[in-house]
Amino acid sequence: MATRTREQLITPSGEVELAQALDQPMRRLLGRSLRLRSVVAGSCGGCESELFALSNVVFDMARFGVEFVASPRHADGIVITGVVNRNMVEALERTYAAVPDPRIVIAVGACAASGGPFRDSDAIAGIPASIPVDLWIPGCPPHPLTVLDGLLRLLGRLDGRHPAAAPG
């Protein structure tokens, strides 16, 4: 499941600390909607396929007020997929800069988190330190429910319990 820090993706015990919500002022500012601009930064296309599935009738993320937009100027944040190769760093930084403040950043997939199978390549730059990531969603590719769960937790619409936990 999604986490707020990259370090939380590594769990020696197998226990996952689920993503915590944004702070109250940020959630109040976003209201009941979230507009995201996707940045494909050296991806195989797997993560984008799963993100695209979020718009179908099965997952229907729009019912939660989450939608992808064509322009970063109309977005509340960006979704980064892929390894972020050196040729995409400037485009990613420009897209990030074009999103109005305050903004959120979501890294989707194993490649965005660690470089995936290409991590040792000289062509890989990774997400620049100048771009703070608010949500890390693991997987190769992550299932649409994993993405949706992380987004809803980030927005404070799901509590801290694991989705499979029985009501107590």
Image (cartoon, rainbow, N blue to C red):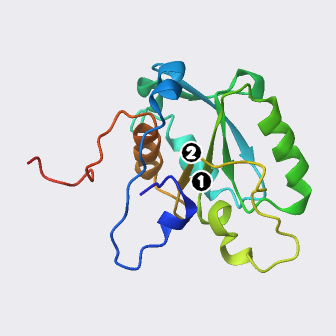
Q: Which mark is residue 108?
A: 1
Residue 32: % across, % down: 45, 20
Task: Classify residue 87 by image quadrant.
Answer: bottom right
Residue 52: % across, % down: 57, 41
Task: Classify residue 82 by image quadrant.
Answer: bottom right
**Which residue lies under the disc numbered 2?**
51
Q: Is residue 6 above or below residue 89?
A: below
Residue 163: % across, % down: 27, 50
The residue located at (43%, 50%) in the rendering is 19
Q: Is residue 61 above or below residue 114?
A: above
Q: Give the camera-side residue of 120 and 142.
A: 120
Asked whether the residues under the numbered discs 2 and 1 touch, taking CB atoms below 8 Å apart as contact, a structural biologist would say yes
Using a 10 Å C-alpha cutoff, classify the residue at mark 1 as few (fewer than 14 neighbours), some (14 to 19) or many (20 or more). many
- Whole-angstrom CA distance, mark 2 to mark 1, is 9 Å
* Three-letter amino acid code at the position of disc 1: Val
The residue located at (82%, 68%) in the rendering is 124
- Closer to the chain start, of discs 2 and 1, is 2
Q: Give the camera-side residue of 132 and 137.
A: 132
* Three-letter amino acid code at the position of disc 2: Leu
Residue 22 located left or right of residue 133: left
Provide the secondary structure element on which disc 1 rests.
Answer: strand
Residue 71 visible in the picture: no
The residue located at (51%, 34%) in the rendering is 55
